Image (cartoon, rainbow, N blue to C red):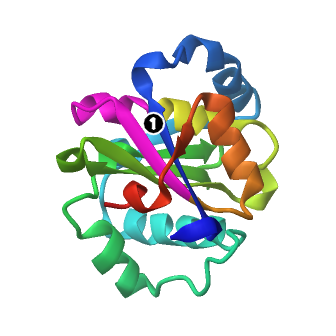
Amino acid sequence: MGETWVGLELDVRHIDVDRWAPYTDRCRSAGLMLTTYAELGDTPSNRRRLYELNRDCAADIPGRGLFYTYEEYVRERVDVPSFDPRGVVLAVAGDGAWAGMAATSDRRASGWVFNEMTGMRREYRRAGVAVAMKVHGIGFAEVCGVHRVRTLHHAANTRAIAMNRMLGYVDVDAGESTV
């Protein structure tokens, strides 16, 4: 993976979730509710909405390249053993629009869960919602019986790296973050 990628890991036993409560409060103040894909239901229309949200949020990721087609997305991201609807935190606006997501996959066989994607649609950014979603999603590690969350970022994605480090993530070998 080399210099282009930054691997990060959080030991959830060392995070004070209450410290980040103001971010959740700001979400509510902005009219956004945090929920999970599991709570909303895995329906054909919700799969399409999840795809569109993920595609929109991924557009600004450095080095991302072309996003999946819908069929590829379902085959490679949803219809796989590591996908668990409980690991997908969604920020939903009062009008029902899906504003952001923090998707975490089940990699418990490797001893951790993996934060696949955290992103917001442009019009909802800058309210601290991404932090609130990530903190909300930390509970998925407990669901999976592990205490580590890993993630991987392109080195140019400095905002995402800084947000993770603010939450307590520490550097790990990027190659080990995807195993």
Residue occupying the point 49% across, 66% down: 49
In the rendered structure, the answer to whether residue 168 lies left or right of residue 85 reads: right
Q: Give SS at disc 1.
A: helix
Is 28 situated above or below 83? above
Spot occupied by residue 93 in the image (x, y as percentages of width and height): 65, 45
168 w.r.t. 85: above or below: above
Residue appearing at x 35%, y 70% in the figure = 77
Q: Is residue 175 left or right of residue 79?
A: right
Q: Is residue 140 within the magenta segment?
A: yes
x and y percent of residue 131 in the render?
A: 64, 36
> Residue 161's spot in the image, x, y percent?
67, 48
Residue closest to the eye, 145 or 172: 172
Residue 88: % across, % down: 41, 48
Place residue 167 in its image quadrant.
top right
Q: Which residues are magenta?
A: 138-152
The reply, left or right, for residue 171 in relation to residue 107 is: right
Viewer-proximal residue among 35 and 86: 86
Residue 94 sits in quarter: top right
Q: In the rendered picture of this protein, how many numbered marks are placed on residues?
A: 1
Could you tell me the amino acid type at mark 1?
Answer: Gly
Please tell me whether residue 85 is drawn above or below residue 149 in the rendered image. below
The quadrant of the picture occupied by the C terminus is bottom left
Q: Is residue 118 magenta?
A: no
Q: Which residue is depicted at the point 38% across and 67% down? A: 47
Mark 1 Cα within 10 Å, few/some/many (few <14, many 20+)?
many
**Who's the residue at 74% across and 64% down the image?**
156
19 vs 173, nearest the viewer: 173
Q: Which residue is mark 1?
A: 137
